[in-house]
Image (tube, grey):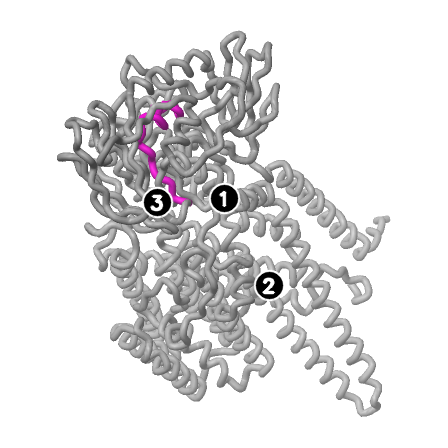
Amino acid sequence: MSNATRTRGSAPPALAPAAAARAARLTAEGPRSLLLAALLTVLAVCGGDAAARVFPFGPRHRAVNDLANQFVPFHAHLWDLLRGRADGGLLLDWQAGWGTSFLPDYGTYVSSPFAPLVALFPRGDIEYAVYGITVLKTAVAAAAMTYLLRRLGPGTWWWASALGASYALCGWSLAEGTYNPMWLDGLIAFPLLCLVGEWVREGRRPLLGPLVVAVCWVANFYTAYMATIGAALVLLVRLLTARAGTADAAGDAAAGPASGTGAGPARDSATGARLAVVRTLLRAGLTTGIGVALAAPVLLPVFLGSRHAHPGLVREFDPAPATDVLARLLPVTYSFSTPAAFVSTAVLLLVAALLFRREIPGRERWLWAGLCAAVLASMQWGPTHLLWHAFATPNGSPYRQTFVLSGVLVLTAWTGFAHGRPDRRALLGGAAVVAALSLGSLPSSFLTPWALLLTAAGLAAVAAALLLPRRGRYGVLAALLVVGTVVGQAAATTAYADRERLVRLDDYPPWGTGQQRRADALAEADGWPAYRTDPGLPRVAGNDPLLLGGQGAAYYSSHTPAVLTGTLTALGGGWTSRGRNLLSLDNPVTDALFGVGARWRDGTVVRAEPSAPPLPLVTVRPPGPAPAYGRSPFRNQELLLGARVYEAPGAGGACRVGTEVFLWAPDATGPARLGGYETRLLGGRPKRLAALTSLGVQQREGTAPRVPPGGRAEIACLDHDRLRAAVAGLRARAATRIDVRDDGLTATLPPGVTGTAVVAAPRIAGWRCEGGKAGAYGGLLAVDVRPGTTTVSCRFRPPGLRSGQAAGAAGVLLLTASLWLGARGRRKAEGPVPLSR
């Protein structure tokens, strides 16, 4: 086939032998290289956890921060969904937050292809399941990077394994990804998206490329976004280095004959190379766009779920000091607010040595080194920091894109292997650079003696391995030195991070016999949808209804709806994490309003009295305006209930004997007492809000509660007889039958009632009701009931789902069209098939 008939998407003929050689090499050595990388990763992670005596290898637990509050409970809920035991489905979760949208949570926390593996474990071993998935993801990331390295250029197979494992065992993975396992999908996505870039560059895999992009974005859109930026930068460097080689070849051809006729062809070749770069970038953009469109049915609900969420902390980016950044390049360091950039001394030495390798074209050396420097600098500059994090400084670790830097460093380290091993001069220069970086980190408070010791030992070991002969026993010794450096440094960093996390981060009780007994008791008392069973207090994690079972107010997510936080706060509920981590509200009035018929309290399940059964999920309020909440949660509860049930305390702040005393002191911290009863409050906005709490029944006249100092405090006295009468009045106007579905509910109403049907669920965006417009009544879902109405049916569809489905369909059409056009172009390029005679 001539150059004139070659299709735009095909590789040049000169690439065909190289591609064939790479394919043969990958076939022969690929599996053992990938398996070795995965094995080294598992050894380092599990070995470090065992050294630290952390679960599952010792008595220290892993239940810290969001791992305990979000990831384990959401995986437990996924287990229930897969086994058909959940209250709700993929669209609507009836268990947490009195009824919330689940698709945004699914797309944020458990949409990974690895997440369904939890169903292979017993429900009581959910923490083992999450740990196993975490280690598996890390191992797959190592294998994916190893495959990419072998695909990019020649080099010793075990070196590819060592560098692939170094990437998966980077500081970001060991210090942050291990307790944010959803982020580890981004660790896998980066090498996969770089591989897609290679397919685009060579005009191959037009179907598989967009599908890989879609899977990466569905698995975890947040880190996939960062990985996509990193892969785009890598593709650009690959194109520029390839163009440099093409330009050099064209220059040699032009300088050949002395006739002076070569300048024109050289210019044409350079122009063609530039056009090829532009075409490749356009193909890459199209491939990425199609893949993201295919993922849109999950991505758009996640995006709009964030828009409807209660706002988190708004903070300004504060770049870390340079000495701290340098310190985090070394093993055995830990910090929450600096980039965990450690990626093994082997990688650092090879990257530094690349600068001194004169046999490698200068453009290739400096483009890769410049990419490393640019990524690192972009992490420290405000505008590019926002670009990496989708234009919002994260509430927590501000360097969540660090894994991309680790990946770029590993790719740069491997680049030199395409030109052979570095010589003594390059190694000496590289070792001097690594030593200078280590010395520059000395002022950092994060630096540990072990960091310097392991860096020095690793530097000596890797340098010796690179100088040893390749064959025989020397080759084995070299491999052991490099592998020992990678695994040893990573295991030590893992153990150090395990210990430091338990000291510096919030921790929660791990799953044990007490939690299992509580879950069993809640399951036995469960009566949904006739009534709710609240998992109660004290809490185990931020999502106890998902972890323990039942249906309650507690809920913690990046998508906690603003209307839910506002409603719970108005009714006296408490929260942490600035309003996104909602706590169970133990109060007889709210229990009546939300149909709580059983709850965990004081080590046992307490059921509603037979004389006062819980209200159904749907009640009809008389015609009139919706309640407008004020400052007092007690008055707000009465407005939602439609009756006065609280009394003001008498002289000296004492309640009438026989009434139940409730205290609301949202900003107070400390013990509150009434007689011999004591409870502790933990409040203080903007981070925490203490819930209103019972101080027990007033036993003696004149005894006033003792309230801890701190902000406003209000005392109210609940009359249970009035509450029973109010509930009885609502029950007479309640639904006689309720059918709850995975995407809504249908309620049969008593004949002749009019007014407003109120569903004991928050009026979050996405509700639609038949026979009337879905409205709000004190923050709850409500529908106008007109004369003759006998049923109310409401359906929930997460915002963005329909648009996401349309975008997904458009992605399928674009993919189909691109495949058809590509096949048509190839057929035209090949010309007509000659007829045989």
Q: Which residue does the numbered mark 3 point to in the structure image?
A: 689
Residue 538, picture quadrant? top left
The CA span between labels 2 and 3 is 44 Å
Rendering coords of residue 169 (x, y %): 38, 62
Query: In the image, what residue occupies the spot 53% across and 86% down?
Result: 358
Locate residue 725 relative to residue 777 in the image: left or right: left
Query: In the image, what residue occupies the spot 53% across and 57% down?
Result: 192
Q: Which residue does the numbered mark 1 point to in the structure image?
A: 309
Rendering coords of residue 566 (x, y %): 45, 39
Label number found at residue 437: none
Query: In the image, what residue occupies the spot 41% across and 66% down?
Result: 339
Q: Amino acid at mark 3?
A: Leu
What's the magenta region?
A: 580-596
Label number found at residue 232: 2
Q: Is residue 539 above or below residue 47?
A: above
Which label lies toward us, 2 or 1?
1
Rendering coords of residue 84 (x, y %): 42, 27
